[in-house]
Amino acid sequence: MPYNVKEIIANKPSRLTAGHRMCAGCGAPPIARMVMRALKPEDHAVVANATGCMEVSTFIYPYTAWTDSFIHTAFECAGSTLSGVEAAYVSMKKQGKLPEGDTKFIAFGGDGGTYDIGLQSLSGAMERGHDMVYVCYDNGAYMNTGIQRSSATPKYADTTTSPVGKAVPGKTQCRKDLSKIMVGHHIPYVAQTLAYNNFKDLYEKSEKAIYTEGPAFLNVMSPCPRGWGYPTEDLMKINKLAVETCYWPLYEVVNGVYHISYKPAKKLPIEEFLKPQKRFRHMFKPGNEWMIEDFQKIVDARWQELLTLEEFTNK
């Protein structure tokens, strides 16, 4: 059936309801809504959420914006918590203690709870082969606690713990490539996506991840207006520029085989993505052109590596 976002929204009510307290212009709510809409209407879900923006804004006891079963777990524990629930479910199913029907297991975590603090439990859950999906909404810093840098923060970004000054030009390290780290776990499905092109890429990859047997991982870029410094109405513009500049390539890896979902006909220069964001404004001051040139080299090298991996794994 051809993808039709209007039909999906009309026929699949949001499982993340209105009334949450996420910021205007935040990338996380559209991500959560489309991931959850990828579930079949008859299927139930258990959602585990690591401490972070999404958790504190959607589940404020005794209130919740989730229509499915929801577990708030500590920053570092989303992977291990949900893998334990999935294991218990499998055991109880075998014992005949649960009714017929299908339950899916979906974890959400920001980059702080995924790239950094929760990487160990995520790695363990993936390696053990639990039938679950882990969704990282990557906003490139610890936004909930004050915009501190994480290993997902891009080079030269201005954060509260990598501030721009006379001696230091923002964060001095490159961002971690977590998607490829997950590919290294040899799991059935890994994808990188974002809310783009009527959510088609995000929805279809979410559906694949949820209904792939075994562990799956989705890395979803999630812009943050407070931490990135863009007008709230420009969320989708930022997402589009991330794709068109190849800062955030759209691809999936199915049983080790790379497939690039979108290749820009004319790749835009990286300054098109950087310029609308206040966290990079120092890069456009006279004398700092070298930062933009270096950033472009990093993006070009990673894009070329991805093209090579696609060619090599499809032979």
Image: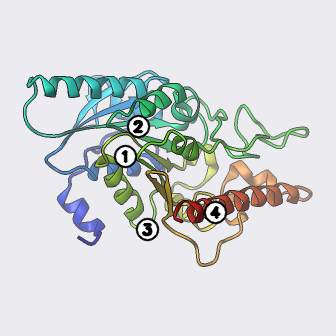
Instruction: Please name which of the two marks, 4 or 1, marks the residue nearer to the observer.
Output: 4
Instruction: Please name which of the two marks, 3 or 4, marks the residue nearer to the observer.
Output: 4
Residue 108 - label: 2
Instruction: Please name which of the two marks, 4 or 2, marks the residue nearer to the observer.
Output: 4
Identify the residue under disc 4. Answer: 308
Q: Earlier in the sequence, mark 4 or mark 1?
A: 1
Left or right placement of residue 52 versus residue 302 in this view: left
In the image, is residue 99 above or below residue 152? above
Say whether marks 1 and 3 touch (CB < 8 Å): no
Q: Earlier in the sequence, mark 3 or mark 4?
A: 3
Identify the residue under disc 3. Answer: 197
Q: Residues within 10 Å of mark 1 (few under 14, many from 20)?
A: some
Q: CA distance from mark 3 to mark 4?
A: 25 Å
Q: CA distance from mark 2 to mark 3?
A: 22 Å
Identify the residue under disc 1. Answer: 32
Q: For the point 21% across and 27% down, which residue is it?
A: 89
Q: Earlier in the sequence, mark 4 or mark 2?
A: 2
Q: CA distance from mark 2 to mark 1?
A: 8 Å
Q: Earlier in the sequence, mark 2 or mark 3?
A: 2
Outermost bottom residue: 265
